[in-house]
Amino acid sequence: RLVVSLASCWARLARQAPSPMGNTTPRLLCLHSFRTSGPIMKDQMFEFSNFGEKLEHAGYDLEFLNAPYQCNEEDEKKVYAVVKQAFSRHKKYYEWYNASDDKTEYHRLDETVAYLEQMLEQKGPFDGLVGFSQGGCLAHLMAYLQATGQAFTRHPPFKFIIIMSSRRSRATIHQPLWQAPPPTKLPKAIVFYGGQDKACPVEETKKLIETLPGAEEVYLPDSDHRVPNLPDADAERLLDFLQQFRRSCCRCF
């Protein structure tokens, strides 16, 4: 009975631990942009940028997930031509949600939250989230929903989020989150944004940063709406940010 009890205890602890440091490398869940895909984001981070390389160099494994909704033929006609040209070997496109014309309602978001709950249980746990564009908006929202106990409560608290070229949700239902004082259990954050970004202007990202107390900002004046290719100094800032979480893990053992 004692053996069975200990085995059950260890199994429970293994499920709860955000980043077991024995045989398991710390892991990040990567959330892609609107009407792209997990494989496209992987290419953005490794083929068109050094961002993925820097994360791996810091000791993290990356999991790239497709959103639950696959674009139909009509949706695919609206995919940006530059995306289709740059990532021509990828023929499928996905979205986490679709905003109404006035941006106040996010269609299919409830289904996405339920899907992510399932994916976290099946593929997790994850130490942190990485999101670009719509994926960054979603990572920010996930952090808030978890910190306020509204979703993702079965998953260990995210230690940090990495956001690139993103805004906070404009959906009416989420505005009380931004108007209330930030919850105390929010993960730490580092936010990258570009001065030439027309899809998500600087002022929009600034509104997101206002909801993340103590967030580290990395402003890239010449960068537009893309996963950034980090110059050495900014890559060091990213590595320094990540290192604090590796140290905290090591102290547990």
Image (cartoon, rainbow, N blue to C red):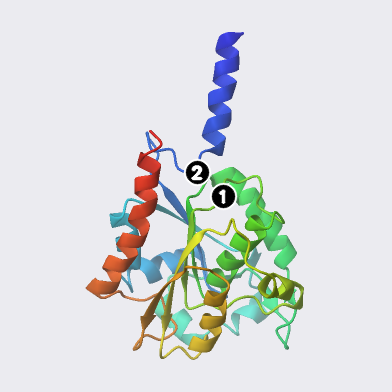
Residue 248 location (% of width, % of height):
39, 46
Residue 107 location (% of width, % of height):
74, 73
Q: Is mark 1 on a helix, strand or loop?
A: loop
- Check the image and report above or below for 129 versus 15: below
Left or right relative to 180: residue 3: left
In this view, the residue farthest toward the left is 232
Category of crowding for the residue at label 2, using alpha-carbon neighbours closer than 10 angstroms: few (below 14), some (14–19), many (at least 20):
many
Disc 2 and disc 1 in contact, CB within 8 angstroms: yes
- Check the image and report above or below for 100 versus 8: below
Q: Distance between the residues labelled 2 and 1?
A: 8 Å
- Quadrant where the C terminus is found in the figure: top left
Residue 206 location (% of width, % of height):
52, 82
Left or right relative to 24: residue 131: right
- Check the image and report above or below for 42 versus 251: below
Q: Name the residue under label 1.
A: 157
Residue 252, which numbered label? none
Q: What element carries label 2?
A: loop
Left or right relative to 23: residue 164: right
Residue at image position (59%, 44%) is 122
Left or right relative to 121: residue 218: left
Q: Which amino acid does label 2 sit on?
A: Pro
Q: Mark 2 points at which residue?
A: 18
Residue at image position (45%, 85%) is 82
Residue at image position (60%, 76%) is 168
Q: What residue type is labelled 1?
A: Pro
- Quadrant where the N terminus is found in the figure: top right
Category of crowding for the residue at label 1, using alpha-carbon neighbours closer than 10 angstroms: few (below 14), some (14–19), many (at least 20):
many
Residue 230 falls in which quadrant of the image?
Answer: bottom left
Residue 49 location (% of width, % of height):
32, 72
Residue 180 falls in which quadrant of the image?
Answer: bottom right
Sequence-wise, the earlier of marks 2 and 1 is: 2
